[in-house]
Image: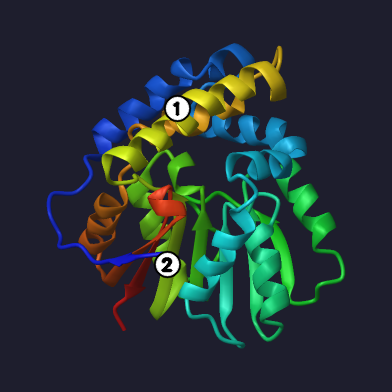
Amino acid sequence: MSQEVFEEKEVLDTETYQKKKLELIDKVGFRDHFKADKWEDFNRDFFDGLAHKYDALNEVLSLGMHRLFKKRAVHNAGLKNGDRVLDLCTGSGDIALYIAKKYPGCRVVGADVSKNMLEIARKRGEGISNLEFIEADALNLPFENQSFDVTFISFGLRNLFDLKEGILEMKRVTRAGGRVVNLDLGKPKGRIRNALYTLYFLKLIPFLGRTVFHRNEFNSFKYLPESGKYFPAPEELLRVFSSLGFEDCRSYNFMFGAINQQIAEIRP
């Protein structure tokens, strides 16, 4: 693991970013498999259809290491009992479940737009009194301002049509002095590391999806690497956070930079 801090420079062009997301609809084959008119609906239908395979795919994509770096990401966030925690784009609830069990004094809310993902998460969370899962749009959260001490989003920021608005919405529901935490793919540096990353995520993963895991159906293994081609690098994301009024923006690498975490604090 390494920690890096970056200075603010030119930040993300929202119009260009959204244009690339719309191009992705055809590039990864969304339109061939899902009946929808806009990005948000394609995204929801994609994860509804993926829900029953989601946990198994996480094992494959991370080489079985996703639990380890999620635990490290939670540790880095500096949680304490009594915190109110939001896990946005919670999926099947991995991070929300881990936090609720590790910090029984916390109140944890997992939110997602996918009904099928939430059904799995709720079954996994049965009997945990300090945890609840709700259906919610990440760009229009049903919470009052400053409702949470810490807001997490894990492999979900890339799925939002408006990245900056998503970050601002997380900022809105997080208290002054609190933190927003993002976990996603990184961009490994160095020729050897970058070559191995490219071989695995851009070549091997789509091949496995097409021939083993998703034969004759939508290949979810193609979406992650394709979306990663234009998703901002960690240092770019830190500049976006900084430009939106966050401070003490920092970054942590896992798996030699293949996975990266950003933590951004809100000025009190």
Q: Which residue lies furthest to the front in this view?
A: 192
Left or right, 87 with respect to 1, comes to right
User: Local crowd at mark 1 within 10 Å, few (<14), some, or many (≥20)?
Assistant: some
Q: What residue type is labelled 2?
A: Val
The amino acid type of the residue labelled 1 equals Leu
- State which quadrant residue 70 falls in: bottom right
The answer, for residue 147, to whether it is visible in the render is no
- Residue 79 shows which numbered tag? none
| Residue found at x 41% / y 64% | 1
The disc, 1 or 2, on the residue closer to the chain's N-terminal end is 2
Instruction: Give the side of residue 229 with respect to residue 86, left or right.
Output: left
Structural distance between the alpha carbons of marks 1 and 2: 29 Å
Q: Measuring 55% from the left and 23% from the top, which residue is drawn there?
A: 206
Q: Judge the density around disc 2: few (<14), some (14-19), many (≥20) Cα neighbours within 10 Å.
A: many
- Tell me the SS state at disc 2: strand
The image shows residue 135, relative to residue 51, as above or below, that is below
Q: What sort of colour scheme is used for the picture?
A: rainbow
* Nearer to me, 3 or 6: 3
For label 1, the SS is helix
Q: Residue placed farthest to the left in the image?
A: 9
Query: Which quadrant would the C terminus be assigned to in this image?
Result: bottom left
Q: As displayed, is residue 16 above or below residue 79?
A: above
- Identified at 61% across, 44% down, the residue is 63
Picture coordinates of residue 14 (x, y %)? 26, 39
- Rendering coords of residue 150 (x, y %): 49, 73
Residue placed under numbered mark 1 in the picture:
202
Residue under label 2, please give it.
180
Q: What residue is at 44 percent from the left and 64 percent from the top?
A: 181
Q: Are marks 1 and 2 in contact (CB under 8 Å)?
A: no
Residue 127 placement (x, y as % from top left) = 87, 70
Residue positioned most to the right: 127
